[in-house]
Amino acid sequence: MSDSYRLPARLDLPAAEPLAQALRGRLGANMTLDGSDVTHLGALCLQVLLSAARTVRHAGHDFALVNASDRLTEQLASLGFTPDRLSGGAE
Amino acid sequence: MSDQNDPMADIRASFFVECEELLEALQDGLGSLDDGVGDSETINVVFRAVHSIKGGAGAFGLEHLVRFAHRYETVLDEVRSNGLTPDHENVKLFFRAADHLSDLVRASRDGLTVPQDAGDALLAELDAMLGTPAETDEASAQVEFTPLGIGIDLGDLDAPFDAGSAPSTRWSIRFQPRAELYETGNEPQILLRNLARLGTADVTCDVGALPLLLELSPETPHLAWTIALDADVSEAEIREVFEFVDGLCDLEVSLALYDDNTASTAERPPAADVNAPAGVTLPQPDTAPQDMPAPPPARRAAEPPARSVVRVDLERIERLVNLVGELVINQAMLAQSLVSAGLSPHSDAMNGLEEFQRLTRDIQDSVMMIRAQPVKSLFQRMSRIVREASAAVGKEVRLVTDGEATEVDKTVIERLADPLTHMIRNAVDHGLEPGADRVSAGKSAEGTVRLSAAHRSGRVIIELSDDGGGINRPRVLQIARTKGLIPPEASLSDTEIDNLLFLPGFSTAESVSNLSGRGVGMDVVRTAIQQLGGRISIQSESGQGTTFTISLPLTLAVLDGMVVDVAGETMVLPLNVVVETLSLGPDDVQMLRPGAELVRVRGGFVPLYDLGAMLGYRSRRTDYTGCIVLLISLDDGNRAALVIDGIEDQRQVVIKGLDDSFFRAPGIAAATILGDGQIALILDPADVIAGCLVPLPVDARLPDRSSKEERLEHG
Amino acid sequence: MTLTVLAVDDSRTMRDMIRLALVPNGFSVHVAEDGLDGLDVLSGLAPDVIITDINMPRMDGFGFIDAVRAQEDHRATPILVLTTESAADLKMRARNAGATGWIVKPFDPGKLVKALHMVTG
């Protein structure tokens, strides 16, 4: 069981590539992302999160977004998601 | 800024100050272009000056200003972007447009109107310069005057549109961002949030064929969104949300059938491959914009330090100047009473006093510096006078200025404008020969007028010279004789002839041009300069030109004076006129006729004036043996010997205006308060020599306000 | 949360107006006098949004936006261009340089605040 990964505060355009890198490094196990620090969520990072969720589940592991900050929750909502939906299988 | 009573008025005032700076930059730039020393940046500077004036003017709804600036700017922009080099005529036109622009700025500032004809004519010329038909569309220069609401209520901006009450319209929106949308700093999350604020939004993300993480190129957009929006808004309002990303995304906005029960199937465009519907209904955010709490106190500390310049109300400076004047007087009074108390000059108290005196003087100097301004603005006004004057008489004239950074008391600068204007018109009109004459004299057709300023031994020297024909002395002499200004047989030196120009009523202009006109002569100029405590002199060389030199005190508030005793009264004479102090021997005075005596000084004779008698303090002396006289010399070359009864001191005195509490007596320039608290009158030597002093009994002397009262304005 | 704004404009009047419009509304406003000055201020600041004029000495708005976008940290920082021109080609040039949006003068505080919210949410 791996530790949860604490997402950085700003998940904007410049953060997309580093986030993808970080998550690629955690493939092959259950993935738990801690969203307590997040203040900004942009669509490109959402895309990375969705892709990671899909990839993790394809491999038969669990994906979870936990401790979503209020701002993260709210911004996810703008983009058509809830933390649960993101965790629990967007597809 | 926000704590001011009326911040807009403040900014408006500051805008006009900035306009003056911009106009100055504009003048400088045009000057460089005219001199051919400009580079490619010069035209940009010129353009930006006009552009910035237009920008600010627009914000304040100054329509005339915007309209003119816009068209002027358009022409400058053409020149700039096409890399054209404006020729002399073009620059002249730019200068005139700059002059008009400055008229408009000042009219706007003062709430005046400027006749539109002049501007229209200039605009026509500007347009003609480009060879384009006059621009008629006002649209591009249109100012929708937007009164500035100061306390902007964000709540209003974000207020929902009557959510809940009015029947909403259901809109279906499909939005797919492209990479460029992200690259320009736009963000779908924010756009979607703004969209949701219009009403109630049901947002569905179309995840589509999103690659797995290892194949994902994180900056390539794959997502798209479908939004069902219940809001009573028009399509235009929806598209407005996407205004900045128009062309950076695929956007479809369509009206959906309103169906309360089935939410989001019908409106989904068939093309959308929604294999991962992830709908969530956003409640209308009842949260006030959470980014905007109640306005916190302005975080001024966060701002970088502004340029270290403060604007201060002139009245405050005047008050400070007056207070420092009082301080100087008080210090002198204290010194006097310490001396009277019989303190030793080496006592601690006296030493301390000396230090106090030094500090007082330093403070005084520093305060005077506050009032100092560069003469640049004055010179720029003069360059406009040259342009207008030369155009009026059809001569080609260039103005060369030097020493624009020289600082002079603000009041001196203001009061120099009129005399200088007059002198410049004279120089252009009379000083410079017509172009043809110049060419035949081997000069360039274009005349040069040179205006310079410099500090020299504690005074400001302003020189105005032309490279014209010089003073026509035979003609000057002839006129002076014809007008009876000098005796027919008098033989005068060149300098004396030149100084005839300053005589009241002298005017050499044969034909009265509408420029210099008649009646206002150099005598008025000289009077104005003298009222500033200054001197003016002429040097002229035939065929080479004429130079007027004005010498002015740095400030009007302090005078280096000689404190003298006249029949028991303490009076002050400006030190700069005193040439020599003499004690009269029995043979020094010669009587021409009763009441007219001359003093022999180094083989020459100067008229003798008995101050005590002239001021009506006592009757005339009959014997001057042993009397002290001050030999004074004025800028016009006149000399005189003033009989006084004793010299008390030489010191700087603070000039106090003779305002309403004093009437203006001829021969008296102002007053001062001496160390012992006594008021002393400051003599006006020019008046004394001109014979303005009519010896009358003291009680019969009436104020002669008509001619001299402006001399008392300053104190 | 206070939004931090960097306003770059060579006109003191415009800078004052921007401050006056934004500070009472809870923005923290930093100013710079031209593009180079703006980059200088930016080196010690992470603004939530940047407002810039186009016509400025030393470094104009296009150059400034270009330089800002070249910094990894500021690739996504919203940049609004203040312009007196509504001409489409200017908007295009600004956008090509990386501007997020624009505010067409005459300056109107309401318009400015609205534009800021359009790009910052």
Image (cartoon, rainbow, N blue to C red):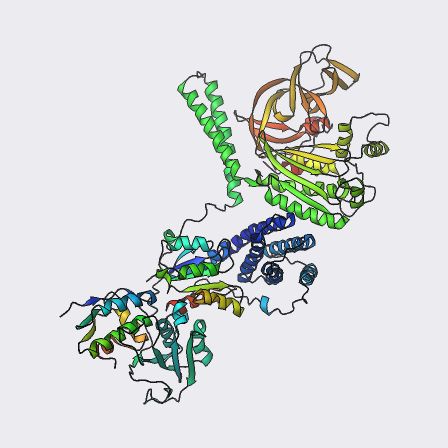
Task: Note whether residue B388 is visible.
Answer: yes
Whole-percent x, y for residue C95 in the image: 46, 67
From the viewer's side, name the closer residue of B401 and B54.
B401
Residue B630 relative to residue B147: left or right = right
Q: Is residue B248 above or below residue B383?
A: below
From the viewer's side, name the closer residue of B691 and C106.
C106
From the viewer's side, name the closer residue of A40 and B626.
A40
Residue B76 relative to residue B251: left or right = right
Q: Pick the quarter of the image with the N terminus of chain A.
A: bottom left
Q: Is residue B520 above or below residue B154?
A: above
Task: Note whether residue B574 is visible.
Answer: no
Snapshot quadrant of residue B200: bottom left
Residue B511 relative to residue A22: left or right = right
Whole-percent x, y for residue C60 in the image: 49, 57
Q: Is residue B290 above or below residue B336?
A: below
In the current view of this chain or complex, which residue is farthest to the front? B215
In the current view of this chain or complex, which residue is farthest to the left? A1
Whole-percent x, y for residue B130 in the image: 66, 62
Q: Pick the quarter of the image with the C terminus of chain A.
A: bottom left
Whole-percent x, y for residue B193 in the image: 35, 73
Number of numbered markers? 0
Residue B462 relative to residue B433: left or right = left
Residue drawn at x 47%, y 22% is: B337
From the viewer's side, name the closer residue of B527 and B710.
B527
Q: Is residue B615 above or below residue A27?
A: above
